[in-house]
Image (cartoon, helix red, strand yellow):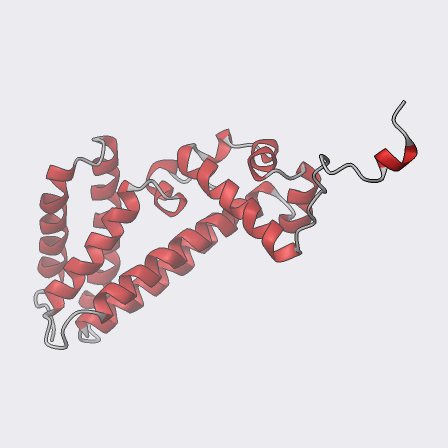
């Protein structure tokens, strides 16, 4: 038998590390991000997320309530990061950069996001099968995207220009879905961007400032 004093001096046991709530929540989100980027919403289970995060299923539910709410948070973070990168890239352009070139820069960041297969980009593939919470997040993001386009283009208040901005997003949805279906081939990136720019310019009738 092992003497009592030996039991008190052993150093081969690794103490369990207790993580604070923010850290643990972040780990769960990171694990979910990877899984939802690789597979559709319906194919990812809470058990799989918990296993990937090194947490329990109960802990996932404790922090997020439901699988749908967890997915919505993953989509929100993905789209927020996309918007942050786009804003930073456009802000880094010279002050006299044309509206067309500002939109081109923003499109390039968006296509990087799509090619990387982020959860935010999976909306092009889900076909409306995402839970309502995630769809609500996407609607909020689209409102913000239209506002960002307004800031870059400064269109007139005509109804035509409002429809042009929203129609551009619809065109981009269809074009990106086709690009994804073809494997996001790099040689098709610029033709996609050119087509999207042409669609926006044609709908606006003018690039604005």
At x 70% / y 39%, what residue is drawn?
A: 14
At x 51% / y 51%, what residue is drawn?
A: 73
Say which quadrant the N terminus sits in: top right
Residue 140 appears at what percent x and percent y?
A: 42, 60
**Residue 115, relative to residue 73: is it above or below?**
above
The mark tally for this picture is: 0
Say which quadrant the C terminus sits in: bottom left
At x 20% / y 55%, what residue is drawn?
A: 107
**Residue 208, relative to residue 101: is it above or below?**
below
Residue 53 appears at what percent x and percent y?
A: 57, 39
Asked which quadrant contains residue 207, the reply is bottom left
Is residue 69 something one can see in this rendering?
A: yes
Left or right: 200, with 127 as reference point? left
In-front residue for pair 5/66: 5
Left or right: 12, with 38 as reference point? right
Residue 142 appears at what percent x and percent y?
A: 35, 58
At x 67% / y 37%, what residue is drawn?
A: 57
Left or right: 34, with 167 as reference point? right
Is residue 131 something one can see in this rendering?
A: no
In-front residue for pair 24/165: 24
Residue 205 appears at what percent x and percent y?
A: 8, 65
Asked which quadrant contains residue 100, the reply is bottom left
**Residue 192, relative to residue 201: is it above or below?**
above
Left or right: 22, with 94 as reference point? right
């Amino acid at each position: 038998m092992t003497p009592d004093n030996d039991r008190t001096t052993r150093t081969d046991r690794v103490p369990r590390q207790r993580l604070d709530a923010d850290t643990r929540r972040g780990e769960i989100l990171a694990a979910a991000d990877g899984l939802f980027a690789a597979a559709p919403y319906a194919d990812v289970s809470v058990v799989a997320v918990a296993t990937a995060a090194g947490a329990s299923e109960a802990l996932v539910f404790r922090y997020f309530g439901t699988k749908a709410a967890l997915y919505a948070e993953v989509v929100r973070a993905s789209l927020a990061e996309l918007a942050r990168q786009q804003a930073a890239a456009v802000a880094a352009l010279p002050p006299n950069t044309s509206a067309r070139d500002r939109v081109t820069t923003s499109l390039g960041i968006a296509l990087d996001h799509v090619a990387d297969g982020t959860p935010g980009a999976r909306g092009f593939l889900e076909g409306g099968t995402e839970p309502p919470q995630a769809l609500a997040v996407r609607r909020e993001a689209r409102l913000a995207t239209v506002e960002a386009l307004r800031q870059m283009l400064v269109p007139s208040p005509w109804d035509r220009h409002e429809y042009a901005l929203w129609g551009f997003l619809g065109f981009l949805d269809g074009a990106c879905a086709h690009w994804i279906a073809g494997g996001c081939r790099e040689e098709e990136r610029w033709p996609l961007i050119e087509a999207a720019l042409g669609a926006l310019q044609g709908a606006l009738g003018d690039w604005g400032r």
